[in-house]
Amino acid sequence: MIMRNVLLFSIFLFFVACHCDDDPNPEVTNSYLPLAIGNYWEFASIGPLGEGLIEHREVADFVTLNGRQYYLLVSTPLSNWAQNPKDSAYYRIDENGFVFVYRKWTRIEENRYRLNGKDGEEWSYDYVDNSIADMMLRKISRRVGKLDIAECNDYSFDVKQWADEEYTYTLAPGIGFLREFSDAWGAGMELKTARINGELIEF
């Protein structure tokens, strides 16, 4: 009887341990892309489209997809001229600080960011229509509103087979998404408000 109780207790502890290790909502605290359910970013337009708020992007869920665990980020347009009601993208960060972005319509996992990369680092990945996306990281300071933010990661995106698709994504330490800009079209968006791990940040 005693042995039976010890065995049952051991099995109980095993399942409790497994449950604790498989946290359904772990918090990724990498300073350049803080992902936790409830974190959000709101962006205003820069360039010819004016200066009003145009997008709310929020970490909505933590899911398993294709055998991997991702944060689901949902982008909701805030402007009247936006065509698509919502956009969903799945983000995961591996042990090297590589950020992979997956969208169901492309079925491609983009290695868009390398959070721990060095200034001038370059890499490539397979993209849509059998093309290759080339990325380059620059360490810069970026002024947003009245704030100068040092040590930002500026990621330039280019597909040599295409025209007018050059794009730059900027991540800021402790904040995450800061600026997204089409170098070819001279338009984009930059951060106005964010809530990161319960703290409200305004520019």
Image (spheres, helix red, strand yellow):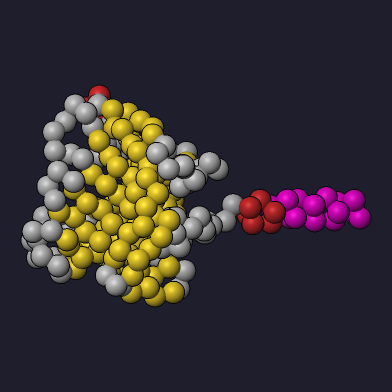
x, y percentage for residue 11? 75, 50
Q: Residue at x 85, y 56 (%)?
A: 5
Q: Is residue 54 magenta?
A: no
Q: Residue at x 13, y 38 (%)?
A: 164
The magenta stretch spans which residues? 1-15
Q: Is residue 4 left or right of residue 189?
A: right
Q: Name the quarter where the N terminus is drawn.
A: bottom right
Q: Residue at x 19, y 26 (%)?
A: 161
Can residue 110 be seen in the rendering of this structure? no
x, y percentage for residue 94? 51, 43
Q: Nearer the viewer, residue 183 or 27?
A: 183
Q: Is residue 4 magenta?
A: yes
Q: Is residue 48 left or right of residue 64?
A: left
x, y percentage for residue 134? 31, 33
Q: Residue at x 35, y 38 (%)?
A: 136
Where 194 falls versus 150 (above or below)?
Answer: below
x, y percentage for residue 165? 18, 39
Q: Nearer the viewer, residue 162 or 39?
A: 162
Q: Nearer the viewer, residue 37 or 14?
A: 37
